[in-house]
């Protein structure tokens, strides 16, 4: 699952989810409806890499990655391009699957435009904020 959020705190903010699994799309749709949030969330069925590639420069405030971890490094140029200054990238399973995302984490940590932090709660969340 990939979540893209634009101006989340503003009243006009919107959240898009990208998912390929029809089962997970149906499950999420039901959960969004039950929570009363369905009107604020757009579900996109498709490949996250394709969606990232089509997203405008500096258009996104928050990206939440809980997807195919082997794809993250290849997505990095688009992830960086679409995040606004002050934008936040959240990578799920950062401690439970640390070996699988180690190269991706290192790539971000070596990028001078980002400040990073690891939150070792649950399966772990890696956070990267775009400063430049």
Image: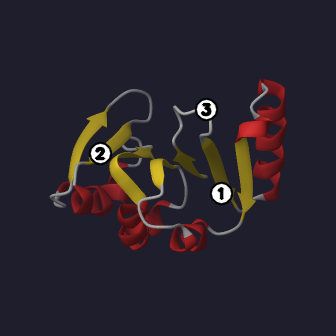
The x, y position of residue 50, in whole percent, is 59, 74
What's the CA distance linking mark 2 and mark 1? 21 Å
Closer to viewer: mark 2 or mark 1:
2
Q: Earlier in the sequence, mark 1 or mark 3?
A: 3
Between residue 12 and residue 21, name the one nearer to us: 12
Residue, x 62% and y 45% (percent of image)? 15
Q: Secondary structure at mark 1?
A: strand
Of callouts 2 and 1, the N-terminal one: 1
Residue at numbered disc 2: 129
Few, some or many residues within 10 Å of mark 1 (<14, 14–19, 20+): many
Q: Which residue does the image show at 28% across and 55% down from the upper left?
A: 105
What's the mark number on residue 18?
1
In three-dimensional space, the C-alpha distance between marks 3 and 2, rounded to whole angstroms, equals: 22 Å
What colouring method underlies this structural image? secondary structure
Report which quarter residue 110 is drawn in.
Answer: bottom left
Locate the C terminus by quadrant. bottom left
Please name the residue shown 57% across and 49% down the image: 3
Residue 108 left/right relative to 57: left
Above or below, 57 against 126 in this view is: below
Q: Nearer the viewer, residue 42 or 128?
A: 42
Location of mark 3 (residue): 11
């Amino acid at each position: 699952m990939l979540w893209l959020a634009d101006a989340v705190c503003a009243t006009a903010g919107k959240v898009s989810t990208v998912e390929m699994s029809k089962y997970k799309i149906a499950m999420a749709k039901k959960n969004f409806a039950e929570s009363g949030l369905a009107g604020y969330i757009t579900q996109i069925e498709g490949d996250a890499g394709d969606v990232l590639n089509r997203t405008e420069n500096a258009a996104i405030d928050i990206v939440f990655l809980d997807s195919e971890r082997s794809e993250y490094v290849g997505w990095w140029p688009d992830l960086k391009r679409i995040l606004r200054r002050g934008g936040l990238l959240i990578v799920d399973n950062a401690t439970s699957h640390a070996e699988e995302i180690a190269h991706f984490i290192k790539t971000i940590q070596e990028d001078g435009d980002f400040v990073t932090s690891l939150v070792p709660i649950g399966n772990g969340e890696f956070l990267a904020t775009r400063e430049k």
